[in-house]
Amino acid sequence: MSLDLLEAWEGRPVRDWAESWGIPLLEVHRSLDSTNDRIRRLADSGCEDFTTVVAEVQTEGRGRGGTGWWSPNGGLWASVLVGVESGARAELLPLVAGLALARAVATSCRGEVEARIKWPNDLQVEERKLAGILCERSGAGGIAVGVGVNVDLGGVKPPARLAGVLTTLAEWCAEPPTRRTLLGSFLSSLRTELPLSDRLSRRQLEELERLDALKGRSVECSGGVRGVAERIQSDGSLYLRVDGGYASIRSGSIRLIE
Ligand code: BTN
């Protein structure tokens, strides 16, 4: 496959951004199938941790559960390779990356937007989807952390299935942040959340509790369990109060039922 790599991005040579963020390699593509797929190919050829790939447009962007991810111009579509040590719990990575991304949104929007975390991998503003995170195994011991943030999609009409479901930073900020500001801030926050351990730290749990979009809400899990979401637990599961007891949900997606 021939690559459509940019030499300069957002006003500076791509190499300069990599250097100023302290990452081993940054690739910015005019167009790619999926940044997660590109990271996997780079990981197979032995690239280092924190190698990062950005695409202006993705032609086959992926979401969780095999769904497509609409990736036109104006979003931040990026993947970062993260190494996971043995003994660490890889399932914590979407939550930890979600924390880093929520912080990056707050910082780069100067506090004008507070994105909430919808377990396990969405960022929402007022129940509409601002961003998603897709973590996939890549190379030996690595994981591609793919983040998609709807920054400023320029009023392009989304596909019908997304109408009223997604939101963009441009809807909430007087001046939406540049993608470089958002990405630089995300990389720096992600670094502070790593390395991954087998449990979330007390500080991470407190921050997740503060940003939890589901806390106290009645939900239905993709496995069919219904209950009230109480909290995210240190092993990354979602703790639900259900009829006659409690349930810990380890994976799947969640739908609000009221
Ligand atoms: C989801 O909410 O379902 C996860 C969406 C993740 C989208 C990002 S965009 C960059 C990276 N490349 C992909 O193909 N997907 C992720």
Image (tube, rainbow, N blue to C red):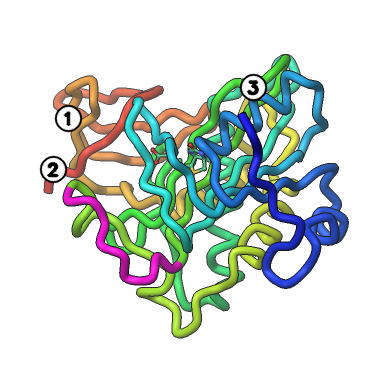
Provide residue 56's location: percent of width, then percent of height. 55, 54
Q: CA distance from mark 3 to mark 2?
A: 35 Å
Residue corresponding to mark 2: 257
- Picture quarter containing residue 200? top right
Work out whether 49 lies above or below 90: below
Residue corresponding to mark 1: 226
Residue 171 magenta: no
- The kind of residue on which mark 1 rests is Arg
**Of the residues under marks 3 and 2, which one precedes in the sequence?**
3
Q: CA distance from mark 1 to mark 3?
A: 34 Å
Magenta span: predominant SS is: loop
Provide residue 11's location: percent of width, then percent of height. 72, 72
Marks 2 and 1: in contact by CB < 8 Å?
Answer: yes
**Which mark, by number, is residue 138?**
3
Span of residues in magenta: 152-160
**Of the residues under marks 1 and 3, which one precedes in the sequence?**
3
Nearer the observer: mark 1 or 3; the answer is 3
At numbered mark 3, what does the secondary structure look like: helix, strand or loop? strand
Q: Residue at x 75, y 39 (%)?
A: 51
Nearer the observer: mark 3 or 2; the answer is 3
Marks 2 and 3: in contact by CB < 8 Å?
Answer: no
Provide residue 170's location: percent of width, then percent of height. 41, 73
Q: Residues within 10 Å of mark 2 (few under 14, many from 20)?
A: few
Work out whether 5 lies above or below 94: below
- The kind of residue on which mark 2 rests is Ile
Q: Is residue 117 visible?
A: no
